[in-house]
Amino acid sequence: MFRLDGKTAIVTGAGGGIGAATAAALAEQGASVLLADIDLEAAERAAEPIRAAGGRAITAHVDLAEEAAIRAMIEAALDAFGRLDILHNNAADQSAALTARDGDIEAMEAEVWDRVFLVNARGTMLASKYALPHMVRRGGGSIINTASNLGLQGNIIQAAYSASKAAILQLTRSVAASHGKQGVRCNAVSPGLTLSPAALQNLPAALRNIVEAETLTPYLGEPRDIAGLVVFLASDDARYVTGQNFIADGGTSSHIPGIAPLRALFSSAPS
């Protein structure tokens, strides 16, 4: 199941975290993969184990703020592999400097809002725009967009990031509606907090404790947990699945507010 032999995939933001795990998982199932990232050295590091295992992997430096770079990324995959079947729009601008300025709306700087939407929403749109004709020409394909559970809920910080992910969810539905009869499926994956290397390094312990308390599983997610879902959506086993959003957040968004203190209350109550 979920085999991808003979298929070609592009993964953006493939230098680490979810992107790197997804690229490796797609290659493990037989896909040839172009790993795209603004950090080319990181993409090369992520491609090395794929090649060492006998997979086909190339890399590309891509700044999703640049339309020409996105178009060139698509062409690079076609030149190397001759076809394009899978596009995982995963990259987002989550640089520490930008994230620190992404607060609530009252404090929001227009340039922060514009930068977040430029990369996250516009970049996803443009990658889809230039991939679609090649997928349609071959009779179909699968686009998987990385959204976020923050695109579904209110939050006191990251208003721009959250809004950009909500935009990606609507873009997902629009592409599914407009190109479904041409064989192109488009779905979204909405991770919760995922313990990528960057998150492990930068996540304050107090914030991690809050999220862990609200998570229903005994553990927080890791990049491989998201990668497995992307592989399924990329495969022909998901041929009847399109226009959907798959939330992978350990149940964080599924319950009523205050589940953590309620759990503590009932677990400490006398029997």
Image (cartoon, rainbow, N blue to C red):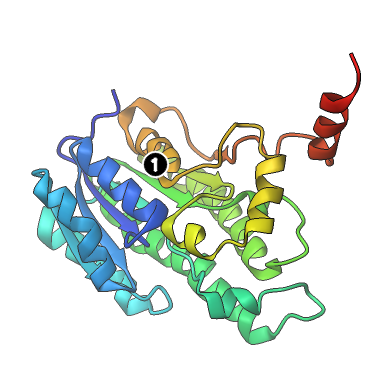
* Residue 205 against residue 144 in the figure, above or below: below
Residue that appears at 79% across and 38% down: 260
Examine the rendered structure and indicate whether residue 38 appears above or below residue 90: below
| x then y, percent, for residue 97 | 55, 80
For disc 1, the marked residue is 224
Q: Report the residue at 83% width, 41% height from top.
A: 257
Image quadrant where one finds the C terminus: top right
Which of the 4 image quadrants contains residue 25? top left
* 29 to the left or right of 162: left
Residue in the image at 49% along x and 72% along y? 119
Q: Is residue 89 visible?
A: no
Task: Give x and y (percent) for residue 125.
Answer: 47, 63
Disc 1: CA contacts within 10 A as few (<14), some (14-19) or many (>=20): many
- Quadrant for the N terminus in the image: top left
Horizontally, residue 259 falls left or right of residue 26, namely right
Q: Nearer the viewer, residue 33 or 227?
A: 227
Q: Position of residue 12 (x, y in %)?
A: 35, 61
Image spot of residue 228 (x, y percent): 38, 36
Q: Nearer the viewer, residue 190 or 83?
A: 190
Considering every residue shown, the one lying at the far top of the view is 271
Residue at horizontal 21 percent and vertical 38 percent from the top: 28
